[in-house]
Amino acid sequence: MLESNQFRTIEVSGFKLNCLVEGEGIPVLVPGSAIYYPRIFSSEIKKHLQFIHIDHRGFVPPPAEGLDDSVFDLDVIIEDFEKVRAHLKLEDLIVMGHSGHAFMALEYAKKYPEYVTGVVMIGVTPDYSQATHKAADNFFEQVASPERKKAFEKGMANLKDMITADPEKRFVSFCLAAAAKSAGSGIEPKNRYERRVAAS
């Protein structure tokens, strides 16, 4: 078992991936963000599970300017997680992901089943197909309030400026800009960002 309450950085192909280990018990690899996801798990569950929160490349500054988009492909990100697992000498672990990170967890488990005892997918669509995206867009158009649609449009209109202002956080900027379209969200992206900063 890894020493708990340890924050570390593991470098993979020049990307400095943050990793936070919390809790005691069965190891659970949680891909996505070592900053955001630790906040959602209760102290009670951490008595039974050891969470290994690991950034993916989209959450950290790139090692160089002008990188090809292929360095962010899913298969490359999966290999990052495997390098982190090997570095930490983890075996017999659960992989857990939320939303798009759930697909990362599933793909990791499919590629490296010898290390995985289970997969937990939270708040995820049935697949990542164009048909599912179109159905989600149609649902949003039919059900979302005018205020929520306006917040989404405002977030998308601001996205380019957000990325220009802080290109190292382009993935985070996209998540904030699209926040009003996320399931269960009625929070305008700017307010969600301010709440996140205030909670830091």
Image (cartoon, grey):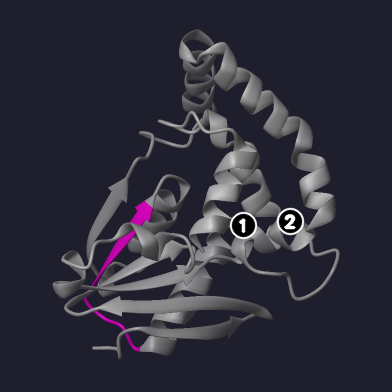
Report the residue at 28% width, 74% height from top.
Answer: 115
**Left-right relation of 118 to 198:** left
Look at mark 2 in the image and give the residue it sits on. Answer: 69
Q: Tell how many labels.
A: 2
The three-letter amino acid code for the residue at tag 1 is Asp
Answer above or below: position of 80 versus 147. below
Report the residue at 40% width, 30% height from top.
Answer: 184
**Left-right relation of 152 to 126:** right
Seen from this angle, which residue lies furthest front?
Answer: 198
The three-letter amino acid code for the residue at tag 2 is Asp
Residue 3 x/y as whole percent = 30, 91
Residue 166 x/y as whole percent = 78, 58
| Quarter that holds the N terminus | bottom left
Magenta part of the chain: 89-97
Query: Helix or strand or loop: what does disc 1 sit on?
Result: loop
Look at mark 1 in the image and give the residue it sits on. Answer: 73
Residue 27 x/y as whole percent = 24, 75
Residue 155 disc label = none
Q: Give the distance between the C-alpha atoms of the residues marked 1 and 2, in whole angstroms.
A: 7 Å
Report the residue at 46% width, 32% height from top.
Answer: 185
Answer above or below: position of 141 versus 45. above
**Left-right relation of 167 to 129:** right
**Which residue is more in the foreground, 96 or 77?**
96
Task: Indicate the quadrant where residue 168 lies.
Answer: bottom right
* Mark 2 burial class by Cα count in 10 Å: few <14, some 14-19, many 20+: few
Q: Is residue 144 magenta?
A: no
**Which residue is more in the foreground, 69 or 26?**
26
Report the residue at 74% width, 56% height from top.
Answer: 69
Query: Taking the image as drawn, is residue 111 in sight?
Result: no
**Left-right relation of 125 to 116:** right
